[in-house]
Amino acid sequence: MPQHPFFDRSFSRSSKARNAEQTIPFVQKSLEKNLQWIQDEFHTMPDLQIKRFITNQGINAAVIYFEEISDKMMIFNDIINQLVQQGSSVQQIQSSTVIANKGENTSSLIDVEQAVLKGKSTLFIEGLSSAYVFDTADFPIRNIEEPNVERTIKGSHDGFVESHGKNIALLRKYLPSRQLKIKQMKVGKRGEIKVSLMYLEDVTRPEILQELERRISQIDIDVIINIGELQQLISDNKFTVLPQFLETERPGTAAMEILDGRVAIIMDRSPSVLIAPIHFIGFLKTKDDYNINWIIASFVRFLRYISLAVGILLPAFYIATISMHFEVIPLKLLLSIGESRERVPFPPLLEALLMEFALEMLREAGLRLPTSIGQTVSIVGGIVIGQAAVQAGVVSNIMVIVVSLTAICSFIIPYYDMSAAVRIIRFPMMLLAYLFGYVGISVGIMFLLIHIISMNSIGVPYGLPVTPIRLYDWKDAFFKLPQRFLTTRPDSARPIQKRKSQLSKRGR
């Protein structure tokens, strides 16, 4: 049966691509043949630069690189000028005694192609069946600055950037110890990306490290763009809204977690670092808790737990009380609520859903707009919509108060991933409250607790230190004792060394 010409051409191109993959091209002694292959492969990339020159010995040579991702000054000073201005034989060039920026020798044009795409430069010399690859990558990188998401009151204001090397350097600044080790891997078939595991060798349990290595090494994907994709690919539970890794943009936070025995996962091109293993309570603690008085820190932490409960349950309790259990409301308050809801034509569930969805849309609009405009839209939009909805009789005054308190409580939770999870959990709780009242809320809470207890983070129970019970870890869980009492590492990190003051036999 004849096929459309389009399919014939596609088949021809795919066959050609497969044949090209099976035949690995090698560097030829002819400079022109090598450059012709490069030009054929990169014919639609106008930013590829080919600089031809003649060495001091009269040998034709060329350097190829991408203009915007390579250091041009390094290429001209350390490669071209060294060969043009100083006399050198082919043997000296092969041994790299002339070139200041010593290169790697390769005979595969595929290796050359991959190197150039990563910002490196490649030197071809007439008469040599090998090429030299130099690490001259110079990708655009923003300066180190304070993260916009994780604000701090007291403490350092530096944050991670999109550079793998700089993020490692920031952590080394906080932990200048020879026990701080790095295991590096590469992920991605179409575009390799560096992923590094940073940990303290004498503190981190090897089983956790091996499990992370196994999961990352098994990833089979074209390329990973954001670290959030990596987090989803290596998570234990794929069907949950609760975060299983702590994502932070602060080197200080990552350093503190590494000291507890956890592993920091650093990915190139990402301004965030993943921390594993982590437990539920870890999302309600911040680095600022250790920079202020322990009484104030305990009070603030208590507020976070209250906010967590209010953010999940307040709309559900309102719906259940108005729909089924109005007898628990004091008479005067009941009369006030009845007067407020007199003109509202919708049941409490629909009323709450309207306001919650309006709030979520305002929140998303504020995030997508520029900072100055986004804040204005969120504030003004909330006030205008709330006031107009009450005057139109769409929602009641008490509903506006409930939704506002719920939004404020979700903002108090320090980490965005957990805050987003609270916002999602709120909706099934509202539905259970409308259908079954307080009994539905109780069932929802039990299911949530069972879900938390059954979860793991890299094999470590997610509910620690509550379940399994670790009473000695409670001194830095629901509240915080003075710093001098925090001498042990939490069991949620499964550390080898339990005491923080203990040193390994090999020393620091």
Image: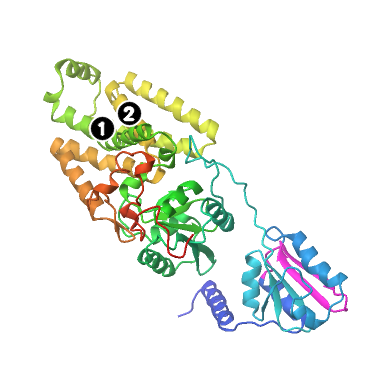
The amino acid type, in three-letter code, at marker 2 is Leu
- For image coordinates 31% across by 24% down, the residue present is 401
Answer few, some or many: residues within 10 Å of disc 1's Cα (few below 14, many 20 plus, some between 14 and 19): some
Q: Is residue 461 left or right of residue 78?
A: left
Question: x, y percentage for residue 444?
Answer: 19, 43
- For image coordinates 62% across by 46% down, the residue present is 143
Q: Out of 501 and 288, give the one closest to the viewer.
A: 501
The amino acid type, in three-letter code, at marker 1 is Leu
**Where is mark 2, residue-wise?**
405
Magenta stretch contains residue 58: yes
Which of the 4 image quadrants contains residue 502? bottom left
Question: x, y percentage for residue 26?
Answer: 66, 83
- For image coordinates 43% across by 54% down, the residue present is 258
**Where is mark 1, residue-wise?**
314
Question: Under tag 2, what secondary structure?
Answer: helix
Disc 1 to disc 2: CB gap under 8 Å: yes
Query: Disc 1 to disc 2, how far (Cα)?
Result: 8 Å
- For image coordinates 22% across by 29% down, the residue present is 318
Please give the range of residues in magenta: 42-66
Q: Out of 373 and 238, give the one closest to the viewer.
A: 238
Q: Out of 67 and 502, give the one closest to the viewer.
A: 502
Q: Out of 112 and 335, give the one closest to the viewer.
A: 112
Residue 484 in sight from this viewpoint: yes
